[in-house]
Amino acid sequence: MDKRETEEIINKELSDEDIEIEFYSGDATENDSKSESPKTFKEKVKNFFDTSEKQKAAIFITLGFIAVVILITSLSMNNRKNDISAATPGQASKGEAYKGEGTEDDFDDTKGSKNSSKKDSKEKETVDVSKLEVSEKDAKDDAQNKKDNQEVNEGFQSINSASVSTIPSTMYDKARISYGIDVSKHQGDIDWAKVKASGVTFAFIRVGFRGYENGKLCKDTTADKNIREAQANGINVGVYFFSQAVNEREALEEASLTLDYIRGYNLELPVVIDWETAKGYRTYSMGGSQLTSVLSTFCDTVGSYGYTPMVYMCQSDFTTRINTTDITNKYLSWLAWYFDEYNHSNRGLNVFTYGDKIPDVGFDYYIWQYSSNGAIDGINEKVDMNIMIDRRPAYEPQMTITNKEIITNLNVPVNIRDGVTASDIDGNDQSAAVITTVYTPQDVEIPVETAFTLPGSYRIHYEYADSSGITFMEDALLYVRDYPIVYWQGNIWSGTNTQTYQYVYDEGVSVNSNYNNIVNAVKNLVTAQCYEKVINASDPINLEGNFEGFEKIILGNTMVSGYTDVVYTVNDGRGLSVTKIIKVEVIRNQQHSTNAQTTPIESQTVPVTTATETTTMEETTVEEKNNTLANGN
């Protein structure tokens, strides 16, 4: 029941009271609003109760009618939201890699798809497909036109491949070219097991189309069966919609229907807008920005729902009807261009073989439809034949730096290219092309030979520029270790290789006690450290040095005044060692010998002697003197 019918019914019911309800049509003017003087709420209430019962009934009927309209509108909006939500292919994990940024990486393996986690941040609005008039009956479409009327655009006529630019298919690894078909209801009942056994690895299945004369929308009634059975037999599946959209609205309708038709399927391949035209088609005069906007609307819509969009066109339409790069740089391309060698009357001969030439059209296409006159076991009708080309390079250029830290000793050169490898887009070894540059901590470039002569840390910059235009850069650290650091009395021992230690002989104790005093004093004066890398790059490591020559301080059974060289050597265990000399000077005020035990004690095993008895004044004086001498005063 429409609005007009409702008005007539209500007015008829109220005719005996000469009351007529006027329904607001939304066309009120400013004069209309001023013609009635304002009334207070109280007056309106009073007037209501003063009206007759039929007047009240009329008002209630009007209010009820308005409530029904509001309810229907609300339900319609809710259903529309559900339709859009239902069209979201959350489970379509293989149909996502929308090439919205124009990167070839979006074409995953030979499937052109990625994980659906990378959807557009906002799904584009679709139309309510329940409001669209869609037929499941036969209508004139692309295949019917080709089959019955033979009104084919010149772009779909086969040509001599020698007359156009081509490249050998051997430019691509054999494993990167796969073989497939595209089908619709015109192929009839398909035995997909036989299709798979014939070598077909992928199939694009039509889900719907728009009539090429009157623009009527139709569903392909074989789509669901074909999708299910193709996938059940291990064939990768994508879908296409034959478009005859002449504006963005119609393109949005086609995209919305496609999303609705593929809901619940996990597609391995892209979702395609199949755009074709010929004389007699409603789209025959289209081109330029109008056609570009139609293609973009469809692709952007399905892409925003997680699918990979693709555009199907013939060669002449790709290159003359649109600004080619506006489409081919943004979306994946499916090129239809038929060569004579695949158009034999014996359809079994119309098969592409690896090594055959493929079209060179100035842009990358991922599928080439090379014949519409093919024969495949399991399909009784002729069928479109395609190859899919994985255009990613057989080898990815790369550079690898194995050693992120290189440690060497001072004046010990090492090869900073060890563990450095690089390869180009063709898989060739390009390790020698890697450029190495050494920088100081102040970011000053120096020759690597110079770095080996100066202890410290350095940055090595590795860089490889591949012929494909990709440049790799990576840094590593070079540590040039210094010799162990020796300390004398807590200060770095530098400037001279010799230090002197004076010892005043204590006549009040034995020769052995004096010997022990000397050894312990000298050992306490000398310490050493090293670093695993360099200062500030690792913690210091304390080292135990080796002393040689202490035993020469004792001659026979006595100790006399004079100098004895004690050699101190410290090794860091990493290839670096330092040798120092301590000149031990013994000072005796009286020369005499003693019969006390004077067996020399090797410096490496000298026990520490600690006095436990109270010393005499003379002993205290001697000890103070030795401390004074040891401190250099």
Image (cartoon, helix red, strand yellow):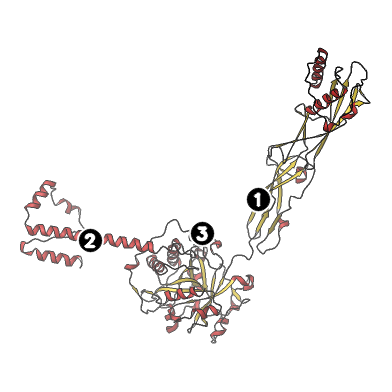
Work out how far the residue at label 3 is from the one at label 1, CA to CA, in angstroms: 27 Å
Q: Would you call the spot at circle 1 few (<14 residues within 10 Å), some (14-19), or many (20 or more)?
A: some
Q: How many marks?
A: 3
Look at the picture and state if 445 lies above or below 50: above
Q: Secondary structure at mark 1?
A: strand
User: Which numbered disc flags the more N-terminal residue, 2 or 1?
Assistant: 2
- Residue type at mark 2 is Val
Q: Left or right: 12 with respect to 111? A: left
Q: Left or right: 71 with respect to 437? A: left
Residue pictured at 43% horizontal, 70% vertical: 286
Question: From where the camera sits, is residue 371 visible?
Answer: no
Q: Quadrant of residue 348?
A: bottom right
Instruction: Determine which residue is flagged by label 3.
Output: 101
Look at the picture and state if 364 lies above or below 615: below
Q: Quadrant of residue 9?
A: bottom left
Residue pictured at 72% horizontal, 54% vertical: 419
Instruction: Determine which residue is flagged by label 1.
Output: 474
Q: Residue 7 in the image: x percent, y percent?
A: 15, 64
Q: Quadrant of residue 227?
A: bottom left
